[in-house]
Every structure is written in structure tokens, then in C-alpha cells.
Amino acid sequence: MQRCERLYLIAVDIIAMFAEYIQAAMDQATYEIIDDPEPFYGEVPELEGVWATGKTLEDCRRELQEVIEGWIALKLRFGHPIPAIGGHSINASAEPVSIVE
């Protein structure tokens, strides 16, 4: 297998891992209506600090997904562990990964 093909397959696996984790987090989200100009409130209780609001439920869901994505990026950037959710996890190493042909 060529190096380029191997890199492509690794990228596809990583994208799938992130997509599955984000979907699992969204599946765990809870929503409520609050007294606010953006009355829809959503959070993922298993992910500390992950919440969003929106004028509609769909706005709230979109915002919540963006918050989850940013939360993951910050956790990775600072080397903090990312808890498993719904049987899905993101395992990242601080070490570079070599690709051997």
C-alpha cells in the first residue's frame, strides 16, 4: 500500500472516530425551555461545560454540536483526557505517529 493511500485511510478513520463521538454526545443531550430570549437550552451532562442555547430547538442543536466540536479541540490542544460517551472515545497521543511502509 502506498504511503498516500495509508494516510488517506488513517484520515478516514480519524474523521469517523470524531463523527461517531459527536453523534454519541448529541444522543446524550438533554433539552429544556428556559426564560430567556433564546429559550431553548441544551447540554450534554456527561461533558462538563458543554451547553448551548438557541431561538429554536434546531438552532440550539446546531450550536450544541459546534460547542462539542470546540470542546474536543480544546481538550486535545491542552492534552486533557476526553471521557468516553455512549461507548465511543477519542484517544489521541501526544507522540507523533510514524507510518511504516
Image (cartoon, rainbow, N blue to C red):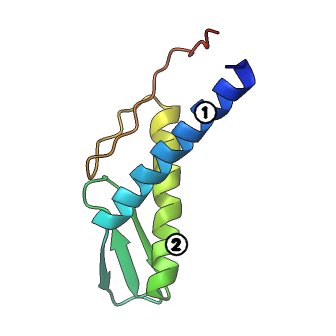
First in residue order: circle 1 vs circle 2: 1
Which one is in front in this view, the residue at disc 1 or the one at disc 2? 1
- In-image side of 53 versus 33 (left or right): right
Residue type at numbered disc 2: Arg
Q: Quadrant of the image for the C terminus? A: top right
User: Residue 31: where, in percent of width, then height?
Assistant: 31, 78
Q: Which residue is mark 1?
A: 9
| Identity of the residue furthest to the top in this view | 100
Examine the image and state in which quarter residue 12 appears. top right
Structural crowding at the residue carrying mark 1, measured as other residues with C-alpha within 10 Å and reported as few (<14), some (14–19) or many (≥20)? few
Structural crowding at the residue carrying mark 2, measured as other residues with C-alpha within 10 Å and reported as few (<14), some (14–19) or many (≥20)? some
Name the residue at 32% across, 66% down. 27
Residue type at numbered disc 1: Leu
Mark 1–mark 2 distance (CA, rounded to whole Å)? 28 Å
Examine the image and state in which quarter residue 50 appears. bottom left
Q: Which residue is mark 2?
A: 62
User: Residue 3: where, in percent of width, then height?
Assistant: 71, 19
Name the residue at 39% across, 32% down. 80
Name the residue at 67% across, 19% down. 1
Mark 1, secondary structure of its residue: helix
User: Residue 53: where, in percent of width, then height?
Assistant: 44, 77
